[in-house]
Image (tube, grey):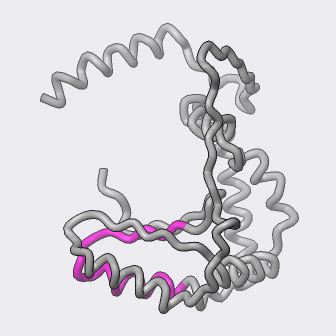
Amino acid sequence: MPSAPLTVSLDSRGLFIEVSGYNDKLPVLLEQVLITILDLDIRDDRFDIIKERLTRGYRNWELQPPWHQIGDYTSWLTSEHDHVVEELEAELPGITAEGVRVFRKELLAQMHMEVYVYGNLYKEDALKLTDIIETTLKPRVLPREQWPIRRLLILPPGSNYVWKKTLKDAANKADRDLTAKALLLEQIAFKLYFD
């Protein structure tokens, strides 16, 4: 499935901006996204609506099938600085529009940037995109000792850890026998359909 032409997200390492599409239009799209982030007007009324949607989304996330939830929990259990939905949801009531305004300014004021470019672009194109980011955002350089490092837990050989989680929706349990059969059928059929 092709990715969206624009993705803006935030995780424990920082702000991620991903643009994709025709290479001749990427600089224009990237610059417009960066200007929008810089000039973003966080209105109280819109903030309240988005905060309510996010709260509902977090609550609904806990009602998804277990196989949807397992990836997030696995990442949380094996990462040094990761958060699960319950932790994020618990913080939402105390977050204000003014707090987000201050956070945005702090986030954009000083940073370490990494630019990854792939596809049918030349080195000069990659340098042009990097220059657009630097000249538009104009951040102070974050000292190397403050660069975010994403560390994963390495389990020693022979480890046998169990982490149990009670689902919010008790009726949402997977039938192991049925799931195993479905996964086996998927593997058998995949080769036929792929070829």
In the rendered image, the quadrant that contains the C terminus is top left
**Which residues lie in the magenta part?**
16-36
Residue sticking out furthest to the right: 94
Q: In this view, does 156 lie above or below 72?
A: above
Q: Is residue 118 left or right of residue 143?
A: left
Residue placed farthest to the top in the image? 177
Q: In this view, does 49 lie above or below 133?
A: above
Q: Residue at 20% of width from left, 23% of height from top?
A: 191
Judge by depth and name the residue closer to the eye, 126 or 59.
126
Tag count in the figure?
A: 0
Q: Is residue 156 left or right of residue 18?
A: right
Identify the residue at image location x=32%, y=15%: 185
Residue 133 spot, x, y in % from top left: 46, 83
Instruction: Name the spot of residue 54 as percent of width and height, x first.
Output: 68, 60
Q: Does the magenta stretch include residue 19?
A: yes
Q: Is residue 162 above or below residue 109?
A: above
* Left or right: where 119 falls relative to 12: left
The picture quadrant where one finds residue 143 is bottom right
Q: Is residue 10 magenta?
A: no
Query: Relative to 129, is 169 above or below?
Result: above
From the top left corner, tell me how far across and down residue 117 is, in percent: 34, 67
User: Where residue 66 sits in the image (x, y, percent)?
Assistant: 60, 29
